[in-house]
Amino acid sequence: MMRLDKLLAHSGYGTRKDVKEIIRKGYVIVNGDVIRDDDFKVDEDNDEVIVQGSSVNYEKMIYLMLNKPDGYISATYDRHDPIVMDLIEGYENRGLFPVGRLDKDSEGLLLITNDGLLAHKMLAPKYHVDKKYYIKYDGIVTSDKKNMFEGGITIDDGYKCKEAKFIPLSSNEAYVVISEGKFHQVKRMMEAIGCKVTYLRRVEFGPLKMDDTLGLGEYRHLTEDEVKSLKIE
Ligand code: URA
């Protein structure tokens, strides 16, 4: 059960103050009765709530796919720079956060949710969720170097990365697939083989594929099938 004003505020009907006003004016009907009491308790899963003729679709868990632009930090707070959450509107106080990080200058698929359990599963090393990146780079990747990805590349701090894939697209473009998420991992793996990443975009995150109809900075809800595909057992 939850307060009616909270449910409406969380469903995009405005701030707590705005929704109290809507309720007091008698615009809200719960299971057929006009309710003017903002602390009225509703069963968010079963009660029928109607505001000015339209029924309210309350989502407890929110799953958004964002096409992250360059220049934004993947965090819920930063003292200096814009954060990815600045791009998401209408879900204030819903506890949304980005699942994992893309570097400030990286672009592409970022999952934004308030489902902490799912986030943990997407990030925990034991679930080995693959992440696929499209990169542009300077330098030459010989077939020997390409093969090093399969064996595990050792990066600057001495860490030996897990098996990864390097899929060439042209002489300076490739896909790189990794199942971990060490800080700057793809850039550091490329540095370890004498190359420099000049552009990086995440195109896949586990079963999710970047929706190419989303422009940079745009987002959409995951479809029901996409949400189902994420439920890792
Ligand atoms: N690897 C990187 O180096 N940067 C990212 O943003 C993601 C993976």
Image: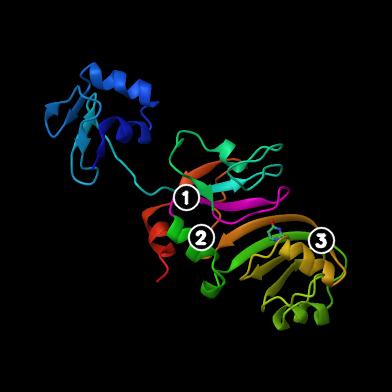
* Labelled disc at residue 113: 1
- Camera-nearest label, 1 or 2: 1
Q: In front: 39, or 211?
A: 39
In the displayed structure, 156 sits above or below 227; it is below
**Rendered location of residue 112, percent (x, y):** 51, 49
> Which residue is pictured at 22% across the width and 21% down the height?
27
Q: What amino acid does circle 3 point to?
A: Tyr
**Quadrant for the C terminus in the image:** bottom left
Magenta segment boundaries in residue numbering: 99-115
* Labelled disc at residue 137: 3
Q: Secondary structure at mark 1?
A: strand
Q: What amino acid does circle 1 point to?
A: Thr
Is residue 158 shown left or right of residue 26? Answer: right
Q: Secondary structure at mark 2?
A: strand
Who comes first in sequence, dot 2 or dot 3?
3
Residue 228, picture quadrant: bottom left
* Labelled disc at residue 208: 2
> Which residue is pictured at 30% across the width and 36% down the height?
7
Q: Is residue 117 visible in the rendered structure shown here?
A: yes
Q: In front: 164, or 215?
A: 164
- Camera-nearest label, 3 or 1: 1
